[in-house]
Image: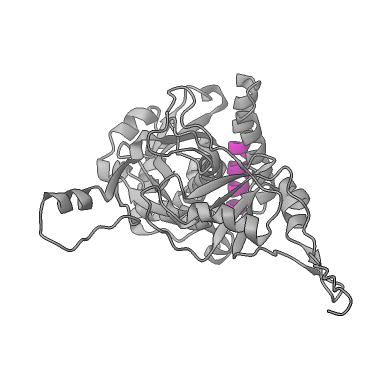
Amino acid sequence: MLKNKTIITEAASEMMRVFTDENATEEAVQAAFDKFGNAIAASVGQDYLSANGDTAVLAQRGFRQLTSEEKAYYQRIIDAGKTKTPVQSYIGLPDTDKVMPETIIQDVYKDLTEEHPLLSRINFQNVSYLTRWILNDHTAQTAAWGDVNDEITKQITSAFRVVEVNQCKLSAYAIIEKDMLDLGPTFLDNYIRTFLKESLACALEKAIISGTGLKQPIGLDRDIHKGVSFSSETGYPQKTAVAVKSFLPAEYGKVLSQLAKTERGTMRKFDQVTLVCNQVDYLEKVMPATTVLNANGTYSTNLFPFPTEVIRSNEMETGKALIFLPEEYFFGLGSSKDGTLEYSDDFKFLADQRVYKIKMHGMGRAWDNTVAVLLDISKLNPAYITVLQKTETAGA
């Protein structure tokens, strides 16, 4: 894989920090994005050039052997990118040529889920170029005994919901030297996939955890119960956090019981839950609350009374955590029928650089409001062994 992965990761973290800083200037945002894009371009270019065309070495470094469809797609992008009027050349491409092959997006999904534990647990669906996705609300009863009548039809119809995928557009731009287009389709494929992967990783985790639903996905920490007030300025409100002081069976079981029944009142069965918190809270709160010194003089860890997978994500707010059922969160992600890449020389023309704009459509939300519980873990106590003392009276 990429030799400069650490540099890219640091640049991505810096970019997200600047993006979420309300006091950041436009110049600071632009500089952070430039640094991120240039880090990827430099790293991919270095890996590609140092391989000297050796296909085995390129494969070891993450460069894929392209399908004929992918190669043709990238070659047309390169040809259009080398013209003096790239925008017009791009628009002139036939629809079948300018839409990104589905295999590229599938490969990006695979890399994302392998490298980011939270994303690997989410129910991702590649919706390709669809703009509406019909979901079956599997928690509802969709069949009933009795006569075939209008009432049963209504029950079945109400078991489906439509998610508008195109209401959320994820856009990013990358800068690449025009001379690097001469490196060919294999280089461009790795560059585009790396940029998509790193950009998506930054945006997806934040949206899945705390997206407001306002021109972005709806996060797990959002209150989406039927009838909730949606603000045109702030989106869905955050859930009210449930304060927990320990993970002892009685207290933890009471929290998990909130996941056991859907909003419609149907019982939901599950054998494991996921807890997500940030790194600091894991070390200062969750780890001490789930670790005890045993009789052998060693520590027993991850002592939850119910099977719980702990995932650390620094997108989680300090002092809070989420308990949720990851398979009950749907995320549809696809490309745009209008083309995935657009070009412009306006931004960096004098520097002989070409700007690529990447667009993807997507939408994520929990099945209902009972899929996740927001926790206040600011007063979470360390674990301890409880000893019951029995007092016997004389003569008993």
Q: Nearer the viewer, residue 97 or 317?
A: 317
Q: In the orientation shown, which residue stands out farthest toward the bottom?
A: 395
Q: Is residue 119 left or right of residue 246?
A: left
Quadrant assignment for the N terminus: bottom right
Task: Identify the residue at horizontal 29%, vertical 45% (top origin).
Answer: 161
Classify 347 as above or below 119: above
Q: Is residue 328 visible?
A: yes
Q: Is residue 37 magenta?
A: yes
User: Where is residue 128 shown, x and y percent of the image?
Assistant: 33, 49
User: Where is residue 34 shown, x and y percent of the image?
Assistant: 60, 31
Q: Give the overall secondary structure of the magenta segment.
A: helix
User: Where is residue 192 shown, x and y percent of the image?
Assistant: 48, 45
Classify 29 as above or below 38: above
Classify 236 as above or below 299: above
Q: Is residue 77 magenta?
A: no
Task: Identify the residue at horizontal 65%, vertical 24% (top origin).
Answer: 28
